[in-house]
């Protein structure tokens, strides 16, 4: 942008961005124009301090212009390559632009007072015994919440920026000498090369951009909105990625067993933590395989079902106009539909609509002879089991896996269920999360592999780090 075209360019931008305010001051041949966004700057400082000082300066009774600008930390921004987008970036970052028309000079002064909210409990991860503060949309505030818990110079913070539709600040946090070097170099290289990637869509855009496998069905990273759990993950050898405008932190690299770990596990005794974690693992198997196994037994292997149970199921399905496979698909679809409706409706009415709608629709379907009680019960157990999973991305993954197992089981019976199980195991073994194996348990002994799924009592002076590389057989579990 040429210096003599600054005024015209700024006024042209204001005609299309009417949320930008201007103030014009002039005296003795001098003319000064102020540009700012009223809701992004501290209007009290501008109205009560800066503008009166500027008026005194123009009248010749106040400070000199150089002293006033230096006192407020003004920086000249009228370099030859300055464009309209750069001016917009300054304005919408809480800067006050001061334009001197007589000398065609433009200065920026930081009067930022951005909208923000106080840290509060995360809605995604309700706290029972842990800390009740949560991440917010401010990047610097989130880093401060981590620093408050980890007051050590070994915690490294590196800033990056995406220059897409709008510049977006990113931050990488990791502990010195605890993250595998291959994973650390990989995420650093991907963040440096993120370039003009559009991250306005949120944290999911960032995860896809840096994961290295955007088509992966399995979640390659975890996320949290709780600073205490994020700090614990850093100590355990993970890195965090924060994004401006997102109240969550991305955690990587991860293994399959770590997706079953709750942020509250460390606040309970190891007995309760083990029981809860094993319950989630069993629930994952139930939600993925129970519909497929039931359909395969009912359609192909009736001799494997106890006679009394088979008779009960057969009587309950008398007169149904659809096959068992279609009935199971319809039951799962209706229950998923109700759950999605409850999640999208306001919190006060969502749970009520889900419960009442489920009762009314289920009772009507049973009375109309469209669904059988046994199929409705099994579909409900599968849906409820999936809701016990901690990671929301893993919940979505189990829906896809459940449908995959159900289709193969309907086509090939128990043989199809076994094929689906082996295929998913091979897929998980061949998947990696930022250079670390997603299913690394073949590298460990039986005891070490078991300790990846349970938590032992904490030892004195133990950092309890989860290693993603081959570990000693005496390694403590996560």
Image: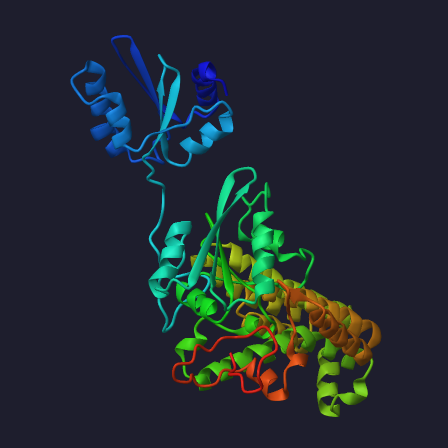
Total label count? 0
| Residue 385, position as x, y percentages in the image | 58, 74
Q: Position of residue 164 (x, y in %)?
A: 57, 39
Quarter residue 66 falls in: top left
Q: Which colour scheme appears in the figure?
A: rainbow
In the drawing, does residue 337 fall left or right of residue 80? Answer: right
Q: Residue furthest bottom?
A: 307
Residue shown at 55% from the left, 57% from the top: 341
Point out residue 317 in the picture as x, y percentages from the top left corner.
Answer: 74, 77
Q: Nearer the viewer, residue 265 or 376?
A: 265
| Quadrant of the image occupied by residue 213 | bottom right
**Left or right of 331: which side holds 64?**
left
Residue extending furthest top? 29
Residue depicted at x 77% and y 88%: 304
Residue shown at the point (37%, 71%) measured from the top left: 130
Can you tell which quarter of the image residue 320 is in? Answer: bottom right
- For the point 75% across and 82% down, the residue is 314
Residue 393 visible in the shown view? no
| Percent position of residue 244, x then y | 46, 48
User: Which one is nearer the viewer's eye here, 459 or 389?
Assistant: 459
Closest to the observer: 262 or 450? Answer: 450
Tell me if residue 385 comes above or below residue 170 in the rendering: below
Q: Which residue lies furthest to the left in this view?
A: 61
Q: Is residue 207 visible?
A: yes
């Amino acid at each position: 942008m040429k210096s003599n075209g600054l005024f015209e360019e700024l006024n042209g931008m204001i005609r299309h961005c009417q949320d930008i305010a201007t103030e014009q001051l002039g005296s003795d041949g001098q003319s000064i124009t102020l540009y700012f966004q009223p809701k992004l700057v501290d209007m009290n400082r501008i109205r009560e301090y800066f503008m009166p000082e500027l008026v005194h300066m123009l009248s010749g009774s106040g400070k000199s212009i150089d002293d006033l600008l230096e006192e407020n930390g003004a920086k000249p921004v009228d370099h030859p390559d300055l464009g309209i987008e750069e001016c917009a970036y300054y304005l919408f970052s809480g800067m006050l632009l001061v334009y001197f028309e007589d000398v065609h000079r433009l200065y920026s002064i930081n009067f930022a007072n951005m909208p923000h909210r106080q840290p509060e409990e995360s809605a995604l991860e309700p706290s029972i015994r842990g800390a009740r503060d949560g991440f917010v949309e401010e990047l610097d505030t989130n880093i401060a919440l981590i620093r408050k818990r980890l007051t050590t110079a070994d915690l490294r913070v590196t800033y990056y920026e995406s220059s897409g539709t709008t510049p977006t600040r990113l931050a990488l946090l990791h502990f010195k000498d605890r993250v595998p070097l291959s994973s650390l170099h990989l995420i650093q290289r991907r963040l440096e090369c993120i370039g003009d990637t559009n991250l306005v869509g949120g944290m999911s855009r960032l995860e896809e951009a840096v994961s290295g496998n955007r088509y992966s069905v399995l979640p390659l990273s975890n996320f949290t909105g709780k600073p205490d759990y994020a700090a614990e993950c850093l100590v355990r050898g993970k890195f965090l990625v924060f994004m401006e405008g997102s109240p969550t932190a991305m955690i990587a690299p991860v293994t399959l067993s770590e997706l079953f770990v709750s942020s509250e596990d460390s606040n309970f005794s190891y007995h309760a933590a083990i029981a809860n974690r094993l319950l989630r693992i069993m629930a994952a198997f139930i939600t993925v395989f129970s519909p497929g196994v039931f359909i395969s037994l009912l359609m192909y292997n009736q001799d494997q079902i106890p006679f009394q149970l088979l008779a009960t199921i057969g009587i309950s399905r008398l007169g149904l106009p659809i096959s068992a496979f279609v009935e199971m698909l319809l039951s799962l679809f209706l229950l998923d539909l109700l759950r999605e409706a409850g999640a999208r409706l306001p919190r006060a009415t969502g749970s009520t609509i889900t419960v009442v709608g489920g009762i009314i629709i289920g009772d009507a379907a049973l009375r109309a002879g469209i669904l059988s009680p046994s199929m409705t019960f099994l579909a409900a157990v599968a849906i409820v089991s999936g809701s016990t999973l901690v990671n929301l991305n893993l919940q979505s993954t189990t829906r896809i896996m459940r449908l995959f197992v159900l289709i193969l089981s309907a086509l090939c019976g128990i043989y199809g269920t076994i094929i689906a199980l082996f295929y998913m195991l091979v897929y998980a073994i061949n998947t990696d999360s930022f250079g670390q194996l997603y299913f690394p348990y073949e590298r460990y002994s039986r005891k070490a592999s078991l300790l990846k799924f349970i938590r032992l009592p904490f030892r004195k002076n133990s950092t309890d780090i989860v290693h993603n590389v081959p570990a000693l057989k005496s390694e403590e579990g996560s």
